[in-house]
Amino acid sequence: MTTRDLSEDTRRKLMGVSTATLCTALFKRGLRNQFIQDVQPLRAGRPNMVGPAFTLRYIPAREDLNPISVFQDRAHPQRKAVEDCPPGAVFVIDSRKDPRAASAGAILVSRLMVRGVAGVVTDGGFRDSPEIAQLDIPAYHNRPSAPTNLTRHQAIDIDVPIACGDVAVFPGDIVVGDGDGVVVIPTHLVDEVTAEAVEMTAFEDFVAEKVLEGRSILGLYPPTDPQSSADFAEWRKARGR
């Protein structure tokens, strides 16, 4: 699998599993730190965000290099990244966990949306956050922020390894977001992690149904009682899962 490959079958499956389940599958493989810290969706209730990472890295702004006139340069890294991010990718921004200035605003996020980008994540903040929340693109940030990025951030690198919310994000890593937040899956693990997450989701749906019916979690979750495994097999067969 190359850094930009994500099969439609795997993408479809990732649309139906939670970041919590994916984190558990990753933990079983020794990966404890794949959930981006301190970011949340601007609007709840959306379908999952899924796509390979395309990255932008900021460093601290230096005043003599970041007047407002830098945006007149068509090759400015922030502007160029917005135009270069591939359709279907997730645009991930390293803002050094600093939301005191905006990583981007509604116009740039709108451009990403119309270009077919799958979502946008920053460990900083977005300006125009009410407008971004209404756009048809999943967006995750730390908190709203009005000042332009130039007051705190200098866009420096495109599509390189970055840190976002204390997680290492490499170009092409698979990024999944839901109502809880965002998890990053190393590319070489995505198919096996996804397959396990689908199985875990089916089992947890079964468990949730039984718990709501009044059943104890003892022997059920985990299924140490052989009857639980038998009941799950029957449940799956009845539901085609």
Image: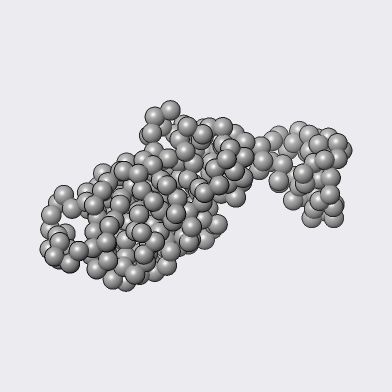
Q: Which quadrant of the structure image shows residue 228?
A: top right
> In the rendering, at what x and y percent does residue 157 appear?
26, 48
Tell which of 205 and 94 is nearer to you.
94
Q: Is residue 108 left or right of residue 237?
A: left
Q: How many marks?
A: 0
Q: Position of residue 240 (x, y in %)?
A: 71, 34
Residue 198 can be seen in this image: no
Residue 182 coordinates in the image, percent (x, y): 49, 52
| Residue shown at 24% from the left, 52% from the top | 156
Identified at 57% across, 40% down, the residue is 30
Q: Residue furthest top?
A: 1
- In the picture, the quarter occupied by the N terminus is top left
Quadrant of residue 68 in the image?
A: bottom left
Q: Residue furthest bottom?
A: 146
Residue 88 higher or lower than 78, as above or below: above
Query: Eyeballing the image, is 60 above or below 162?
Result: below
**Quadrant holding the C terminus:** top right
Question: Is residue 151 visible to the viewer in this orientation of the structure?
Answer: yes
Residue visible at 30% across and 52% down in the picture: 57
Nearer-the-camera pick, 14 or 122: 122
Query: Which quadrant of the figure has residue 100?
Result: bottom left
- At which x and y percent is residue 222? 77, 44
Q: Residue at x 60, y 50 (%)?
A: 20
| Horizontal relation, residue 130 to residue 48: left or right | left
Colour scheme of this structure image? one colour
